[in-house]
Amino acid sequence: MSRLCKLRKLRRLRKVSRLCSLSQLRRLKKTKQCQQSDLHTELTFYGESL
C-alpha cells in the first residue's frame, strides 16, 4: 500500500518537476515557490528525502 501511494506521488512530482527544478525543491520550504495546494506538502516531504 505504501509503495503504491509513493508511486502516485512520484508521478505527481514528475508533472510538477516541469514547473520546479530539483534545486528549487530543496529550497521550497524557504522560498515557498511553485506551491500548488496539496502538492506543496508532498514536494517538501520528497524534497527532504531526496
Image: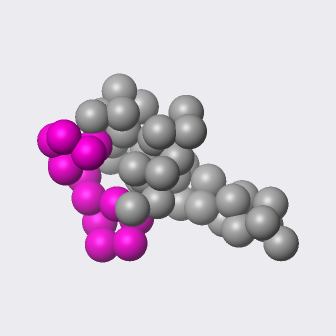
Residue 38 visible in the snapshot: yes
Q: Measuring from the top left, give residue 26's x and y in whole percent.
A: 36, 33
Answer above or below: position of 5 versus 42.
below
Is residue 17 depicted above or below 7 in this figure? above
Tell me which residue sits at (34%, 60%) in the image: 40
In this view of the protein, which residue sits in the foreground, 49 or 36?
49
- The x and y percentages for residue 43 are 43, 52
Task: Identify whether 9 is placed above or below 13.
Answer: below
Instruction: Tell me how the rendering is colored.
Output: one colour
Quarter assignment of residue 49: top right
Q: Is residue 27 magenta?
A: no
Q: How many tags in the picture?
A: 0
Hey, which quadrant is residue 30 in on the image? top left
Q: Position of residue 15 (x, y in %)?
A: 48, 54
Q: Which residues are magenta?
A: 28-40
Residue lying at the far top of the rendered structure: 23
Q: In front here: 15 or 37? A: 37
In the picture, the quarter occupied by the C terminus is top right
Q: Residue at x 28, y 43 (%)?
A: 28
The answer to whether 22 appears left or right of 13 in the picture is left
Tell me if residue 31 is in the magenta stretch: yes
Q: Nearer the viewer, residue 33 or 29?
A: 29
Residue 21 appears in the picture as rendered = no
Residue 22, percent from left and from top: 41, 31
- Residue at horizontal 83%, vertical 72%? 1
**In this view, 21 is above or below 12:** above
Taking the spot 71% from the left edge, 68% from the top edge, the residue there is 5
